[in-house]
Image (cartoon, rainbow, N blue to C red):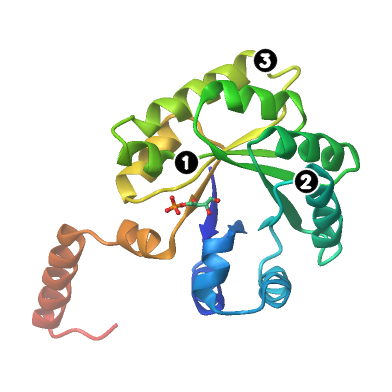
């Protein structure tokens, strides 16, 4: 499973890239707002650091405007993926951009039937938001399982990858991996939480202490 990082913070992207854990990056208007940076500048900077796919979201709700923005975004770098919302206008833009060889990430997906539409229209990625579903008492993981199953059954026609989004815990990352998601987009703090385990810390402290007691030098 590929790891995308869900952030527009340059320093976080650089640190996690050094760890070798960044296959791509996803952004959205909220993350751009939090970064406090100019939209085009930040997308350009991210795409110069990470060679994998960088999702940049359109900011219009009308299909023609989305298409125009998508074409402009795709010119920033050859690894840009245009993010469009799962609306009728977004689907029109998805079809048009995808057929012009521009990669599209269809975002704000909350049902398997929505994902089926994006798959039929040639999306490169579908982004089901599992954390936001969990927030309203609907198990987000079930949505990932359903979409993976549908796309598998129809793999001759649907080439779209399932990009599990809105992830809030390390447990969700391992669960979407087990469910067969192709990609998880993960906030940086969750990656750091994934590394940590108290038994690793305790075990390492014991090993270091016992090594010291041997009196040997490496
Ligand atoms: C996906 O691409 C979105 O940027 C993101 O995962 C949304 O997560 P949130 O629900 O924590 O805002």
Q: Which residue is mark 1?
A: 129
Residue at the farthest top position: 153
Task: Check disc 3 and report its element: helix, strand or loop.
Answer: loop
Foreground: disc 3 or disc 2: 2
Q: Nearer the viewer, residue 123 or 211?
A: 123
Towards the viewer: 181 or 69? 69
Residue displayed at 29% across by 82% down? 218
Q: Residue furthest right?
A: 100
Residue at (8% x, 81% y) in the render: 213
Label 2: how many Cα within 10 Å (few below 14, some 14–19, many 20+): many
For the residue pair 154 and 74, the one nearer the viewer reads as 74
The picture places residue 144, in percent across and down from the top left corner, at 47, 30
> In what element is the residue under mark 2?
loop
- Tell me the quarter of the picture where residue 130 sits: top left
Quick check: can you spot residue 92? yes
Q: Are marks 2 and 1 in contact (CB under 8 Å)?
A: no
Answer with mark 3 or mark 1, whichever residue precedes in sequence: 1
Label 3 and label 1: CA atoms lie apart by: 22 Å
Residue under numbered circle 2: 103
Mark on residue 178?
Answer: none
Q: Is mark 1 within 8 Å of ligand 1?
A: yes
x then y, percent, for residue 204 = 19, 68
**Does residue 152 lie above or below 40 as drawn?**
above
Alpha carbon distance from label 2 to label 1: 19 Å
Which residue in the structure is indicated by mark 3?
A: 154
Residue 133 percent location from the top left of the image: 38, 36
- Tell which tag, 2 or 1, sits nearer the viewer: 1
Residue visible at 30% across and 44% down in the picture: 171
Q: Earlier in the sequence, mark 3 or mark 2?
A: 2
């Amino acid at each position: 499973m590929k790891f995308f990082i869900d952030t527009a913070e340059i320093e976080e992207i650089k640190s996690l890239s050094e760890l070798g854990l960044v296959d791509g990056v996803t952004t959205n208007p909220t993350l751009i707002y939090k970064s406090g940076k100019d939209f085009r500048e930040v997308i350009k900077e991210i795409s110069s650091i990470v060679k994998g796919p960088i999702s940049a979201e359109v900011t219009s709700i009308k299909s023609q405007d989305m298409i125009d923005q998508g074409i402009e975004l795709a010119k920033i770098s050859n690894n840009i993926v245009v993010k469009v919302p799962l609306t009728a206008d977004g689907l029109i833009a998805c079809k048009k951009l995808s057929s012009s060889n521009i990669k599209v990430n269809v975002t704000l997906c909350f049902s398997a039937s929505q994902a089926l539409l994006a798959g039929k229209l040639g999306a490169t990625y579908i982004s089901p938001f599992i954390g936001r579903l969990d927030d309203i008492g609907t198990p987000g993981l079930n949505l990932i399982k359903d979409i993976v199953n549908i796309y598998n059954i129809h793999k001759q026609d649907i080439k779209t990858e399932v990009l599990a989004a809105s992830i809030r815990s390390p447990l969700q990352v391992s669960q979407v991996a087990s469910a067969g998601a192709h990609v998880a987009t993960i906030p940086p703090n969750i990656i750091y939480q994934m590394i940590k385990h108290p038994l690793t810390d305790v075990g390492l402290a014991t090993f270091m202490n016992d090594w010291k007691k041997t009196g040997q030098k490496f």
